[in-house]
Amino acid sequence: MRTVLGIDPGPEKSGYVVLAPGDNIIARDHSWNRPLLSMCARMGADDEAAHLAIERMQYRRGQYAPARVHRTSEWVGRFLYAFGRLHEGERCTCYYPSRVKAHLCRRVYAQKKSIAEAIKARFPDVNFKAWNNHMIDALAIAVTCMDKQGEQNDGKK
């Protein structure tokens, strides 16, 4: 299993969590995108065992997408490129919100509150009072990725 950098992207600031095997939270923050871009580049270059898990933007076809959605999508591409893998593959995974919801809550239409409750139940020793929603979402993405890696490793044995 690998260390996972989970990112909940935003147009200017993004939440991130670095999750190590064994559900050990190494780092977390809600920071400006430029410093996080540098962190992605460092982790992608320095740690061959690192994995980037990021939320993919989901918008319905034919609907008007606000400018913030386009800016957020641009940042997703920048994070992937900085990490060293522009396309999904062995070290990068993009998750739609519905996939994270289905994994953690067993329902595709779960509310944010349900996701937060599932995360808090999985990490009972963590004080989430200082966490904002973006960091909790980033942790949910990282947990989903870590669990999927575990399932793949179990299947290879």
Image (cartoon, helix red, strand yellow):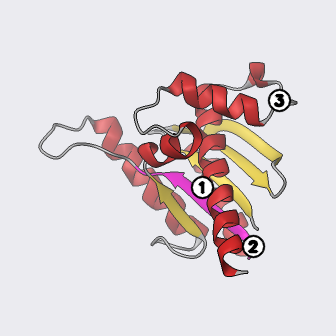
Q: CA distance from mark 2 to mark 1?
A: 18 Å
Is 68 left, or right, of 155 in this rendering? left
Is 39 left, or right, of 90 in this rendering? right
Mark 1, secondary structure of its residue? helix
Q: Residues within 10 Å of mark 2 (few under 14, many from 20)?
A: few
Residue 75 vertical placement versus 47 (above, below): above
Q: Quadrant of the C terminus?
A: bottom right
Q: Quadrant of the N terminus?
A: bottom right
Question: Range of the magenta residues?
Answer: 46-56
The residue beneath circle 3 is: 124
Q: Earlier in the sequence, mark 3 or mark 1?
A: 1
The residue beneath circle 1 is: 37
Q: Position of residue 79 (x, y in %)?
A: 53, 58
Q: Residues within 10 Å of mark 1 (few under 14, many from 20)?
A: some
Answer yes or no: is residue 122 visible.
Answer: yes
Q: Is residue 72 magenta?
A: no
Q: Position of residue 134 (x, y in %)?
A: 58, 33
